[in-house]
Image (spheres, rainbow, N blue to C red):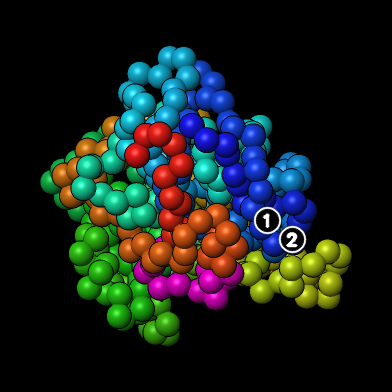
């Protein structure tokens, strides 16, 4: 095993800088993974652009990154499901409160991950294809299945006979949305979604029975018509601004719960610099007003609207059900597609900052991935 290197965020708003990092040591129940491919998430861009606003507990320098795929090079005590040499995809949760944001974050050559947040990869699946999954499938699972979110039944995730209940996924082409469509279908629910017209066939391939264009002003009406009186088990709102139309769907269909993946305002547009700029003050004002209005409107309509925290699955029964019970087998059987399609933004940790910048400009049905060369004796 060689030395470790990471893409460090030395201070809020700074560019990522590649330099040496300590070699993480797996503790009980953890795997040390040599990272072969990593993906970037909106969360990485948001933390870099907004400093401590959302993740006030982070201490700098810090390492970002949630999505990794690679090879297990060491295992901690009490690991039962994985061995050295296994190819895995894993959710790195170092940015979460109480975790080690250096050892357990993904933008580095070696990372430690919890055994329960890793899944074996089929031999034929390239690392870059799998690296698109971790945070997206975890957030989707949290939104659909956590008891304080949509609380859907996930007792059997094997595509059992469809129920007559519908799940609406607003933003199905997003990484979170595309994984939510597949998980909801695996749990037996019918799925209706929204996406740009060019992505409608993709949505059907993932299992949605109907897809509507979210830019069409009549999208809400079209969805209500497609529901056609069937019970709506819940609505997953993905994308900035999606909670409003989802609330209108809930009112019209009688759905009692909305799980929201995104804030009501975009954190992307902020200049990456310190201090309280006018733009930042406006952003927080809009955030406060829109959140308060949304909660007021949903409560007066009898709808429970809650924000998803993807890492909730790490400490609930949903994590083992999805990461342990479902994912490896479903990937091997082709029942869960690694969605979105990987778009390789570069090779080596020095390409990660460029990938985060590309993500800020927007993607459609793609996940930006960086490939890392093998560094250990195991290849
Ligand atoms: N709470 C959590 O734990 C958590 C975890 C992960 C992500 N998130 C949040 O979830 C959102 C999605 O993240 P992601 O990684 O899945 O994003 P992503 O894949 O980068 O999202 C891009 C996709 O979003 C779709 N989209 C954009 N605006 C939309 C709108 N107004 N209505 C419907 N779809 C829209 C686009 O669809 P088309 O290409 O079809 O136009 C595009 O393909 C972000 O806001 C992110 O911050 C939250």
Residue neighbourhood size for the residue with mark 1, other residues' Cα within 10 Å, grouped as few (<14), some (14–19), many (≥20): some
Residue on which the image places disc 1: 17
Question: For the C terminus, which image quadrant?
Answer: top left
Quarter of the view holding residue 353? bottom right
Q: Position of residue 161 (x, y in %)?
A: 13, 46
Determine which of the numbered discs, if any, sits on residue 14 in the image.
Answer: 2
SS under mark 2? loop
310 with respect to 96 (left or right): left
Q: Position of residue 284 (x, y in %)?
A: 75, 66
The single residue placed furthest to the left in the displayed view is 161
Of residues 230 and 273, the one nearer the viewer is: 273
SS under mark 1? strand
Dots 1 and 2: beta carbons under 8 Å? yes
The single residue placed furthest to the top in the displayed view is 78
Q: Say if 165 sits above or below 317 in the image.
A: below
364 in the magenta segment: yes
Magenta segment: 357-367
Q: Position of residue 286 (x, y in %)?
A: 71, 70
Q: Residue at x 68, y 56 (%)?
A: 17
Q: CA distance from mark 1 to mark 2?
A: 9 Å
Q: Position of residue 57 (x, y in %)?
A: 74, 41
6 in the magenta segment: no
């Amino acid at each position: 095993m060689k030395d470790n290197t990471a893409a460090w965020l030395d201070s809020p708003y700074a560019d990522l800088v590649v330099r040496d990092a300590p070699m993480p040591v797996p503790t009980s129940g953890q795997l040390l993974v040599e990272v072969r491919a990593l993906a970037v998430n909106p969360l990485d861009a948001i933390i870099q652009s907004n400093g401590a606003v959302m993740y006030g507990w982070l201490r700098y320098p810090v390492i970002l990154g949630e999505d990794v795929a690679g090879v297990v090079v060491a295992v901690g005590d009490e690991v039962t499901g994985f061995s050295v040499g296994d190819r895995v995809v894993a959710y790195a949760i170092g940015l979460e409160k109480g975790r080690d944001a250096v050892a357990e974050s993904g933008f580095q050559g070696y990372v430690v991950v919890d055994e329960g947040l890793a899944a074996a990869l089929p031999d034929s699946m390239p690392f870059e294809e799998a690296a698109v999954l971790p945070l997206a499938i975890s957030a989707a699972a949290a939104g659909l299945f956590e008891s304080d979110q949509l609380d859907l039944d996930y007792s059997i995730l094997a595509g059992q006979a469809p129920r007559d209940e519908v799940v609406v996924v607003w933003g199905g082409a997003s990484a979170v949305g595309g994984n939510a469509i597949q998980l909801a279908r695996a749990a037996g629910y019918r799925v209706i979604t929204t996406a740009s017209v060019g992505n409608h066939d993709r949505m059907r391939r993932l299992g949605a029975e109907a897809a509507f264009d979210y830019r069409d002003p009549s999208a809400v009406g079209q969805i209500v018509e497609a529901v056609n009186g069937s019970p709506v088990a819940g609505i997953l709102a993905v994308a900035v601004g999606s909670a409003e139309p989802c609330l209108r769907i809930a009112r019209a269909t009688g759905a009692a719960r909305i799980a929201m993946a995104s804030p009501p305002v975009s954190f992307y547009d902020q200049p990456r610099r310190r201090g309280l700029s006018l733009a930042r003050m406006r952003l927080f004002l809009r955030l406060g007003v829109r959140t308060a209005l949304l909660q007021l409107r949903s409560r007066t309509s009898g709808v429970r609207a809650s924000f998803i925290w993807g890492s909730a699955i790490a400490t609930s029964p949903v994590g083992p059900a999805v990461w342990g019970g479902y994912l490896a087998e479903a990937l091997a059987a082709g029942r869960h597609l690694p969605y979105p399609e990987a778009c390789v933004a570069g090779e080596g940790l020095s390409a990660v900052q460029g990938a985060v910048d590309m993500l800020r400009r927007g993607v459609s049905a793609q996940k930006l991935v960086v490939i890392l060369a093998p560094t250990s004796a195991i290849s």
